[in-house]
Structures are given as structure tokens and as C-alpha cells.
Image (cartoon, rainbow, N blue to C red):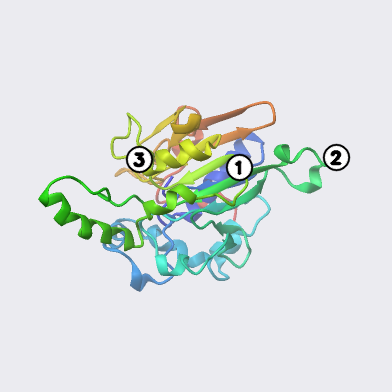
Amino acid sequence: GDIHGRIALMYVLARLWQEHTGQPLAAILQVGDMGAYPDHGKLDRATLRHAQRDPDELDFVRYIEPSEDGERFVNVPEAPRTYFIRGNHEDFDYLGQFRSPSPIDPWEQIWFIPDGHSVDVPLYPESEWTGEQPDAGMTHLRVGAFGGVEPKDVERGRGRAARKAYPKNKQHVRRPKYFDPDTIPTAFHNEPPLDILLTHAGPDVDELRSGSTCLSRLCQRIQPWYHFFGHHHVVLGPKDGPGGTSLVGLDHLDFNAQGKLADNAWGILRYSAESTSFTFCNTEIYPWLHHVRRETYRNLLPE
């Protein structure tokens, strides 16, 4: 879910899960609000306010150039590659310079996927293939991105007041935190079929009344196997979503007022040619998560 700069926490959790289960992770998929602010002079009001409570909200800058934190958390064999999309709390000028999927860090381990683009995510290293290369569907997942949030009231309503408001509402589309609904009908037209769709906002479903009708139409058209989203502070799924997808809503990755890690902000997707499954990670399933606390989580990994 939305990590808001907590990159170290994201990697600590990934490595702890691998240590406790004895299983490797192929990749980390992140659904926006990465907290991509390399210039703290461009922070929005919400990020500034939350950073007063938790300075980790400002940590993105530590990973775009060589640093001790980058060497410790990212540039190690146990750290899976991360793929992220844009949310509505980012430096959009910075992310806008990436016209295709690209790494943002010196170690080329943290990749940004722009809207309407996709990447092939390896399920395991090619060095582990034995004999002939397996079928491509067994070695990679195609992951697509459509970030940002839907602008409100972009449909032309009836009546004088609605007609008067429509031009102003259309201006919202030009604000960088919003996606342009006019791009929905052609998104991913030139991309291979998707296994996984990452969006920041969720689609319009019964459990998510603030969801996006545009994203529902997108899923109905492209029909990915899985659709992951964040943004709404809602834990949802896996459930049947628009287009027959398996829909999953993730909570924000954060700590509560007592410094305890919030449950269900992340989970594990298991994928094979025979079956797929998704499981939320929480203290009921993994009691060791009780030890992940705001003030001490960095000390849970060896120096």
C-alpha cells in the first residue's frame, strides 16, 4: 500500500518475511504514494504535516543517490527489486521526466512505471532455470501501471449550475495528481496483455463508493488477473472485481499512535502456472510482526 517515504520499512518487512519463511521474494509491487519527493521544497501540505509526526515520510531522497541507507536496505542480495507507480502525493515534475519504465536509484533496484506502461517482472532469476527455458507465462508476470486519482465531476451534468461548473471541473484534469479520463479508452492499447494492474485509486465497487468509474471501465476492457490499489485506507479482497479480476485494496504502510505496525498494508502474491493466491500480512498470521515498531524497526536487520 501507500508507503509515503517509508522505503526502509518496506525493505525491512520484505527481508524479515524471507528470513521467517525461508522463501525468496521475486519482487515488490507498490501502488503509489511512494513519497517521491527528491526536493523537499516541493512537498505538499499533507506530506509536510505528516512528516512532523514521522520524519520517515521524507526518506525518498536517501535512495536516488549513493547513501548508507541505500547500501544497507537496497543494494543487498536479499532485497527484491521494487516496481512502483504514482499516487497523488508525489513530485510530479520529477516523475514526469520518466517516459518509460526506469530505475530511479543508483543500484537500478527501484523502478518507476509511468501511466499506461507495463514491465515484465521475473518470477525467479534466469540462473535458476534448468534445461530449456520454461514457457514465458511461467517465468514472468506482465505488470501495468495507471496512477493518480480520478478528478471529481468530469461528466457534464444537467441544468444551468452543472453547465456552469463543467468548465471549472474540467480544469481539475490538468492538475498533475489527477489522471485524464480521456486516456482510459486507449490505455494499454499497444501493450501486451496484463497479468497484474497497479492503480493508485480503486474502481467503483459496492465496498468502495469513492472508487473510480473510469478505472472500472479500464478493468472491464483489459481484464487483468489481479488488480491492486491503495489510496482509500480500505482493506478489500481478494474479491471479484470489474472485468473478472481478483481485486485487492491495501491499507497505508504506517504505524499507529502506539508505534505498532498497521495490519494489512501489504501481502504476498503467490503465482504459478497452476494457481495464484494472495494473502494479507498481519500479526495474526505472522506474530513476529509485533516486534516491528516505529522507533526500532531498522535495528531488526544486521548492520
Q: Nearer the viewer, residue 21 or 64?
A: 64
Mark 2 or mark 1, whichever is nearer to me = 1
Q: Position of residue 293 (x, y in %)?
A: 42, 45
Mark 2 or mark 1, earlier in chain: 2
Q: Are marks 1 and 3 in contact (CB under 8 Å)?
A: no
Residue 130 got which mark?
Answer: 2
Amino acid, disc 2: Thr
Instruction: Check disc 2 and report its element: helix, strand or loop.
Output: loop
Q: Are marks 2 and 1 in contact (CB under 8 Å)?
A: no
- The quarter of the rendered structure image containing the C terminus is bottom right
Amino acid, disc 1: Pro
Residue 64 got which mark?
Answer: none
Separation of residues labelled 1 and 3 (CA atoms): 21 Å
Name the residue located 49 percent from the left edge and 34 percent from the top edge: 281
- The quarter of the rendered structure image containing the N terminus is top left
Separation of residues labelled 2 and 1 (CA atoms): 27 Å
Q: Nearer the viewer, residue 193 or 52?
A: 193
Instruction: Check disc 3 and report its element: helix, strand or loop.
Output: helix
Give the crowd class for mark 2: few <14, some 14-19, many >=20 residues within 10 Å: few
Q: Position of residue 126 (x, y in %)?
A: 78, 47
The answer, for residue 192, to whether it is visible in the render is: yes
Residue 193 got which mark?
Answer: 1
Instruction: Check disc 1 and report its element: helix, strand or loop.
Output: loop
Q: Are marks 2 and 3 in contact (CB under 8 Å)?
A: no
The answer, for residue 80, to whether it is visible in the render is: no
Query: Label 3 belongs to which residue?
Result: 213
Give the crowd class for mark 3: few <14, some 14-19, many >=20 residues within 10 Å: some
